[in-house]
Image (cartoon, coloured by chain):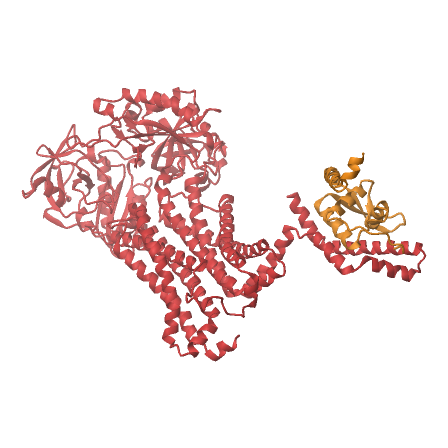
Amino acid sequence: MSSKQPTRVELLQGTLDLLILRTLLAGPSHGHSIAKHIQRTSEDLLQVETGSLYPALHRLEAKGWIGASWALSDKGKRAKYYRLTQVGRKYLIAEQSKWDAFSRAMSLILKPSEEEAQ
Amino acid sequence: MKLFLHKLRSLSQRRRKEQELREELEFHLDEEAEQHQADGLAAAQAREAARRDLGNLTITQENTRAMWTWTILEQLVQDLRFALRTMAKNRGFTALAVLSMALGIGANTAIYSCMDSILLRSLPVDDPESLVVLNWHSKVPRQTRTSQRAVHVMHSMDGSTYDDPRKGMIAGIFPYAAFELIGRTDSVFSHVFAHYPSGNRTVQIKGQADRAGGAFVSGDYFRGLGVVPAAGRLIAAEDDRVGAPPVAVLSFALSNRRFGGPANATGQSILIDNVPFTVAGVAPPEFFGVDPALSPDFYLPLRTNLVVGGEFTPNYIDQNYYWLEIMGRLRPGVSLSQAQAVLAPAFQNWVASTAANAEEQANLPALVLKQGAGGLDSLRRQFSKPLNVLLVLVGLILALACANTANLLLARATARRRELALRRSLGAGRLRIIRQLLTEGVLLSTLGGAIGVLVAVWGIRFLTLLLANGNESFALRADLNWQVLGFTVALSLLSGVLFGLAPAIQATRTDAMPALKETRGSVPGMSAHRAFFRINLSQILVAAQIAMFLLILVAAGLFARTLANLQSVQLGFMGEGVLLFQLNARQAGHQDPEIVTFYSDLRDRFEAIPGVRNASLSHASLLKAGRQHPVSVAGVPAPGTRFLYTGPGFLTTMQIPLLRGREIDRRDQPGSPAVAVVNELFAKSNFGTRDPLGQHLKIGGTGAREVEIIGVCANTRYGGLKRDMPPVVFLAYNQVLQFSRVGQQMTYALRITGDPASYVKAIREIVTHADARIPVTDIITQTAEIDQTINQEIVFAKLSMGFAILALVIACVGLYGTVSYNVARRTSEIGIRMALGAARADVVWMVLRDVLVAASIGLAVGLPVTLGTSRYVESFLFKMNANDPLSLSLAVIVLLCAVLVAGFVPARKATRIDPTVALRQE
């Protein structure tokens, strides 16, 4: 891991699933690249612990929201690739709108001044 | 199913999944290390950093694996393996539980399969659901003393009528005109057909005579039922016409037996009662007609009874003669109630026109349509109540076995408290533990069920034998089929859940902590409360067991005493040493008056067999006879009088004491004055103190005959064992031919010495020599015939005694087990008591008292239940009250003895506890 340590944000309970599903919307990916993608996209604010990533992946697989298959990675090694299933896609859409509503409500309460200033 | 396969696959793939997880994490490490390397670290350090980043690999693996979630199936396999290990560890317990379940389930399956074949199964024909059986019901007619005849339009009947508690009288026989009427109303039925059992007939095939039962069927019978022949063709409408060439359809079994197969039988000529028939075809093997009680060997067109029976012509004309059993097939879309609505008024109109007077008009039968899928219901009427009673009994046994096993499991669950508490504190969910315990229960009962099927196979054979009781024509087709097996499986699972649930609930109700703190062998609250059985499920179960046990014992007592009563009934004749058999010379073509000489010559020849002391004959055996005619003494009618037509020496042969005068002997010939012997009852009720000898009787209505009384004999049973002895008149069969109808068949009675079987050959030789066309049938000793008439009582007594012994074993074993467990658990307490100076007797009493308390509770519940329910079996009892005090007290005594014995053995064991050893256990 890089030596520069930006302030990390603790993952909210239950949000990892959403992040994984959202990441997989772009296309199939293996565990490592999912973690990296989340980290990169969140500008290093979020770091996914391996200890919670793989249990989450396997849980999502058991629920049927993501599927998995073994394929060769771009470096030619065997890797387990996860992809979003139809059910997962539906779940993601539903969760995303819930999340949007939730975060809007949060910001309405936490930053009322901004709202007024506009 | 797909889901199940998937689960199964995931089970086998579990190991591969582990491997994949390792590989996946390995890949992650590699990627991470590569990234570190790209950032400039050396290979070894990069790897190190990646490992550090990943954290505890084992925990990650562990957590990930937890996400796979054990599928239900995997958990089931775990549970099963655990249950099997537990069972293997407690072999004695397992054997006990499985055995009692096997007996319970086996007995239930056997009875159920009989019920299935008798009460539930549909006819093996096309679309049985649309078949309808026609019945009528009517009030029971008043019998007037003068007419001796019931007043209703059913002037005469040939068939069975049944008493119905609500409707009075119910029957399924109709006049021919009613059959024609229903046939004309073709808006509801696509086919209407009639059936009339022919009774046993003499069938000659290739010169060999045999007796076989058959059925006369109307032209639409086979077409209406939708039966496909095994060979040739079946009876059709054109065969059922006067003057049509006589054809017969044989049963598959008869064609096999006598022709070696259906194809060989077709086209052959056979003689039925000496009338030639051509075999048109053979019925399929599964077909047994429409009456499950009969299994006809041949089917003849209805109108051939005019040539075979001889006296049937009036049946087709007489609108008040009820004899035909009618069935119909509903047109598609017509419901039973619609058919009822159309046919009932039509029948009502018709039957009103057949009433002879206002009295008959006032009590007309009403038509009732019934579901006909199961065919005619004579067998159902005969057996439904006995089978239901038996089913309740075996149901009780199974409940007893269940309660037993539950109690043993409960006792064991108490011993397993620490184990269960440990498992709960390690995170096992309550549901998971219940499921585990249920699995154990279901596994036990499934094993029991599997062995129970074997018990059932044997039980069905035994039951069929018992019910048939040597009656060859008895056609019970009970066997194991999918439905019965389904019943067994359901029963096993249900009982497994039932007795698994009790300990499961009990076990998970306890808190984990106190149970863990306990030392082995101690029970919380025990010292404070002296109750030996915990006052909870266990106690309730023991009490319930006692109550059920009492019910079974009382039932056994009632049935056994009924049988004893029947067997000690005064016969009035000497049954031992009498051999009976039947001959029917008329069916072989013998005519009046030659037939009288033929029968009498045979009697002389039978009497000449060495070892035969006396020989005689009568129109039927005493127990099977049932002949009634109008009879009057000096113009005063003597209602209720029965008749027996006998040959010479009948009283001597049967050893019926002659009180006055002489018996009918060789002097009484067709030409000589007609004579009669009356029994004491007849003499007393019709002559009082006057001397009946020399008096005259007038027998019959129009064309009455006068006979002179020449003797008075003692009273005997007539027409069965259960009825009161009736007044009987014995007539000479050769003198009053118009009444005796000699030649339907005659029953010979031989008083013999030695083994009855050794005479059969000589008898057959004599008959064959006289006329080879006549078969000798129904060879039976008088004693066996008596047993046959009380067969149901014998079956009930034997079965219920068997059940009672079974229940006794199960209950004793269960009580013994429960008490032993409790003693074992209280070893240390008993040790302390003894160390403090308790006498052995005190310890025994302490253990016994608690068993007796449970037994008393059971009795307190069981007695009122028994008293309340025993009246349901009242109709099965003979000469005794349903609440027979002797049976009740016997049952209670047996029960208490069983409880004491079952409790005393472990109580004795408790006294042998060595205080020092017991106390050191802690």
Q: Identify the residue at the far left of this view.
A: B690
Residue B679 seen = no
Q: Residue B810: x, y in percent? A: 42, 60
Chain B: what color? Answer: red
Camera-nearest residue between A117 and B82: A117
**Which image quarter: residue A103?**
top right
Q: Residue B604: x, y in percent? A: 22, 46
Camera-nearest residue between B663 and A116: A116
Q: Identify the residue at the far right of this view.
A: B40
Up-down relation of residue B165 to residue B822 (above or below): above
Q: Left or right: where does residue B787 sit relative to residue B270?
A: left
Task: Assign the N terminus of chain B to one quadrant of the image.
Answer: top right
Q: Residue B799: x, y in percent? A: 36, 53
Residue A1 seen = yes
Up-down relation of residue B568 to residue B313 (above or below): below
Q: Left or right: where does residue B188 sit relative to residue B359?
A: right
**Which image quarter: residue B676?**
top left
Chain A: what color? Answer: orange
Residue lying at 36% horizontally and 64% vertically, measured from the top left: B852
Q: Residue B407: x, y in percent? A: 46, 60
Up-down relation of residue B415 to residue B286 (above or below): below
